Amino acid sequence: MIGRLNHVAIAVPDLEAAADQYRNALGAKVGAPQDEPDHGVTVIFIELPNTKIELLYPLGEDSPIQGFLDKNPSGGIHHVCYEVEDIIAARDKLKESGARVLGTGEPKIGAHGKPVLFLHPKDFQGTLVELEQV
Ligand code: CO
């Protein structure tokens, strides 16, 4: 059911420093910061030849990233994003298997303008999983 790894998201305490490091030390193609008020984050996408890295930084008062950074002050891997062809079919199949979908259970529009859902990390080996319809 799942397709390509769309991105790995890393929560960072200093977005500019992280972007500079990927641009200069790692020589990656680094995009511009985008505010995502619906998700409480500012993101920067980094294009790699086979996938992307999503740098996440808190936006607004109750950003879901803030608690993560409080526990991991130097940052850390926050989630992985897998591509699916039909997000509703994928969600329904996963719910049948007992997996919990976060939030309302309805897809939101993600950073690429496509529907996304998040799955409970306790149901996936301690890893927060994002599904993105492509
Ligand atoms: Co993501």
Image (cartoon, rainbow, N blue to C red):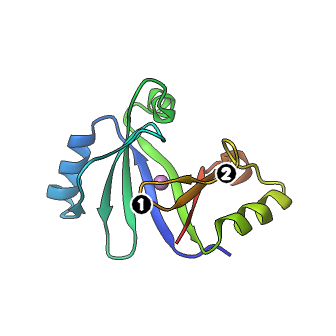
Distance between the alpha carbons at the discs numbered 2 and 1: 17 Å
Identify the secondary structure beneath mark 1.
loop
Residue 33: assigned label: none
User: Where does the image place residue 90, in percent across and percent down from the top left?
Assistant: 71, 67
* Position above or below: 41 against 52: above
Residue type at tag 1: His
Q: Residue at x 77, y 54 (%)?
A: 99
Going from the N terminus, do you reach mark 2 or mark 1 first?
2
* Position above or below: 99 against 41: below
Q: Nearer the viewer, residue 46 or 36?
A: 36
User: Where does the image place residue 76, in percent across and percent down from the top left?
Assistant: 43, 43
Identify the secondary structure beneath mark 2.
loop
Q: Residue at x 45, y 62 (%)?
A: 7
Whether disc 1's CB lies below 8 Å from ligand 1 is answered: no
Q: Residue at x 32, y 76 (%)?
A: 49
> In the displayed structure, does residue 34 sit left or right of residue 63?
left
> In the displayed structure, does residue 120 sit left or right of residue 113?
right
Residue behind mark 2? 106
Q: Nearer the viewer, residue 111 or 119?
A: 111
- Disc 1: CA contacts within 10 A as few (<14), some (14-19) or many (>=20): few
Residue behind mark 1? 112
- Disc 2: CA contacts within 10 A as few (<14), some (14-19) or many (>=20): some
User: Where does the image place residue 5, in percent across and percent down from the top left?
Assistant: 50, 69
Specify the quadrant of the image occupied by residue 117. bottom right
- Marks 2/1 in contact by CB < 8 Å: the verdict is no
Residue type at tag 2: Glu
Q: Residue at x 61, y 75 (%)?
A: 85
Instruction: Quarter of the image for the N terminus: give it.
Output: bottom right
